[in-house]
Image (cartoon, helix red, strand yellow):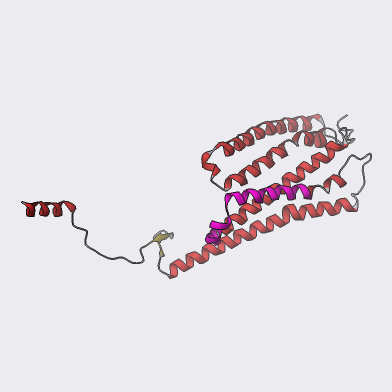
Amino acid sequence: FIERQYGLVDYVAIPVTVFYSLLFIFGLLANGLSVLTLLRSRRMRASAVRFYLLSLATADVLMLLTVPVTLYRYFWQYYPWALSDAVCKLYFLARQVCCATTSWTIMAFTAERYVAICHPLWSITGLRPSRMAYLLALIWLLALVSSVPLTVVYGQASMLEPEPYVLYNSIVKARSVLCFFVPLAAIITFHLLIFRHLSLTRRQREEMGLTHTGSEGFPAQVNSCTLDAPPPAPQFENQNRFETRNQ
């Protein structure tokens, strides 16, 4: 029955189901503990990284909740779709929100690291933890809005189409560009800019004589200006002289 309905045979479907079930259980436990730790830890409350980790952990939990439907769809019964049309739409909506949120959160975190390293003065006033929370909330909202078109093209079908229609192809291509290629290009660009800034800073320090290369090839710190001054007189000698005069 499984093979006849465009699924997989038992010796493939059962091991994969066991693996994904373990992944589902341990993933929920690990991400749940991460969320609780980030919410209760006093050290993490003052850190802006806390919001990024919360966003990523929440997206992972939401993605894990779609694992049972993924198992059913790809490994047990691909066609016909036995679940409702609403489940089909919510399934693809949740997966798209997770993908968009994860990629855009990593892109925002990379941009924040770039600003903190290359523009530290602006980052002190511009990158506040409260603003990071608003930024991540905006990312989730944009991810949800960008996922709405998928509820139009995805749905329960009564037959297998030989080729996807034009609207489906257009939305899938736009999804790939916005959720993969654009974040990937931005992350690579920010890392290259950070590397360039650190290289220029190191070169300037070497020209100013603030650093030199040690015996093993690593930069070593030296003092740019030294002044040989005699050590201050011990306090107990001054105290003895004062007591002698009084006597």
148 lies above or below 18: below
| Residue pictured at 51% horizontal, 41% vertical | 43
Query: Residue 62 sits in which quadrant?
Result: top right
- Give the percent coordinates (x, y) of residue 44: 54, 42
Count the marks: how many?
Answer: 0
Residue extending farthest to the right is 159
222 lies above or below 159: below
Residue extending farthest to the front is 246
- Give the percent coordinates (x, y) of residue 65: 73, 35
Give 216 or 155, whichever is nearer the viewer.
155
**For residue 43, side relative to residue 29 (left or right):** left
Quarter of the figure that contains the N terminus: top right
Residue 9 magenta: no
Give 12 or 18, whichever is nearer the viewer.
18
Residue extending farthest to the left is 247
Residue 134 magenta: yes
- Give the percent coordinates (x, y) of residue 170: 85, 54
Query: Residue 21 sits in which quadrant?
Result: top right
| Residue pictured at 70% horizontal, 50% vertical | 139
**For residue 25, side relative to residue 235 (left or right):** right
* Residue extent of the magenta highlight: 116-145
- Which secondary structure type mostly characterizes the magenta part of the structure? helix
| Residue pictured at 53% horizontal, 45% vertical | 46
- Give the percent coordinates (x, y) of residue 191: 60, 58
**For residue 150, side relative to residue 107 (left or right):** right
